[in-house]
Amino acid sequence: MPQDEYRWPCSQCGAQLRYTPGQTHLTCAHCGHEQDIPAQSASSRARALQELDLATGLRGALPASDLAEARTTTCPSCGAVIEITGATHATQCPFCATPVVLDTGTQRHIKPQALVPFALTEAQARKALIAWMGSLWFAPNTLLEYARKGRAMNGVYVPFWTFDAVTASRYTGERGEYYYETRTVQVRVNGKMETRREQVRHTRWYPASGRVARDFDDVLVMASRSLPARLGNELTPWDLGALVPYSPEFLAGFQAEGYTVDLPEGHAQARDRMAQVIREDVRRDIGGDEQRIHGIETRWSNETFKHILLPVWMAAYKYNGKSYRFLVNGQTGEVQGERPWSIWKIAFAAIVLLFLILGTIYLSDPEALGLPPADWMD
């Protein structure tokens, strides 16, 4: 696509406009002029948010209207695929801060159908991050200083897949029910043997089989390898009811990552998650006190997917030569991060704890420490 296709010059002064989080307009940072994002009709919105057939996508047979070419560059450090939405030719990777030089090539991929616009400003995201950092035990003092100094955070639209499916499963297994028997045992009490009676639990197993069914809607799978899966997947909850049809104006002033987890791999991850839910459904259907599952056969139908972008504010912090990343959900303010530990604070706390333990022992039983009693001078 032409490099100037995604440029938004201010009609008043010519400077670049930027999307205003939580609003429906672009703002010029130079003169303050606001420019509305064109509203889409209900039919256009419904068409943009329509699910795509999964089997067609897995075959690579999607129509050209569902595909797009984008300018991208790959970070040489973390492998992130960064999509370029302006005429920029050099930048930093938003995931690891590595300087990258942008190429002029394009990549053909499944285009995003929808996105959740940023709702939190950078200042609001930093406030949420500072509150989260303040709750961390044994964190370096420089960590909070780093956030409070107003270091810039990167606003990035992170790619996700969503999957829908209708499932019907048959299972075989066993239901375990507890029963108790009383037995007599000999125990030593104060040096003497005593006879006591105790309840011993046993499990009686019965064969079980049956059927369960469940409809899955919008199972989210992060399509990025640049972020630790644990951090990205725990930025929940997301309100997908706020999805709007993809429009490049929402990317003005922000960055977007291209997906590096392709559709087949994303689908495999979604199936694994759905299978775990189905397994729990089977356990509940078997009932009893314990369950054994011998086999589950699932029929999958009406499988569809969407490619969407979700807003994330990011920051990176270096401590003792290691980089730590922090993510803020750009819609809700949920924070996840790789936290550093202060060895000095941990060591000091351990010393204080040791003195408290020794002091307690000394006051209660000083001879255990080989010391005279606390009142030996009285």
Image (spheres, rainbow, N blue to C red):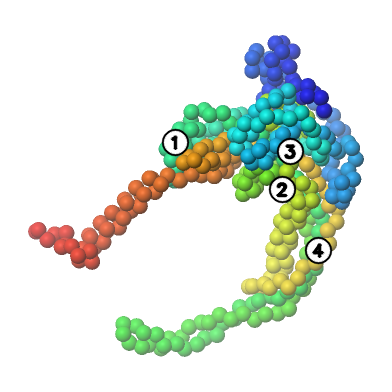
Q: CA distance from mark 3 to mark 2?
A: 14 Å
Q: Position of residue 235 (x, y in %)?
A: 63, 44
What residue does disc 2 label? 221
What residue lies at 79% left-to-right and 51% top-to-bottom? Answer: 264
Residue placed most toward the observer, 90 or 151: 90
Q: How would you rate the neighbour count of disc 2 (Cα within 10 Å): few for under 14, some for 14-19, many for 20 or more?
A: many
Q: CA distance from mark 1 to mark 2?
A: 34 Å
What residue does disc 3 label? 258
What residue does disc 4 label? 298
In the rendered structure, find residue 157 and report the number of the disc placed on it.
none
Q: CA distance from mark 1 to mark 4?
A: 52 Å
Kind of residue indicated by mark 1: Thr
Q: CA distance from mark 3 to mark 1?
A: 33 Å
* In front: label 3 or label 2: 3
Label 1 SS: helix
Label 4 SS: strand
What residue lies at 64% left-to-right and 81% top-to-bottom? Answer: 204
What residue does disc 1 label? 142
Q: Position of residue 352 (x, y in %)?
A: 31, 50
Q: Earlier in the sequence, mark 3 or mark 2?
A: 2
Residue placed most toward the observer, 340 or 336: 340
Label 2 SS: strand
Q: Earlier in the sequence, mark 3 or mark 4?
A: 3
Q: Position of residue 102 (x, y in %)?
A: 71, 29
Q: In which quadrant is the C terminus drawn?
A: bottom left
What residue lies at 83% left-to-right and 58% top-to-bottom? Answer: 300
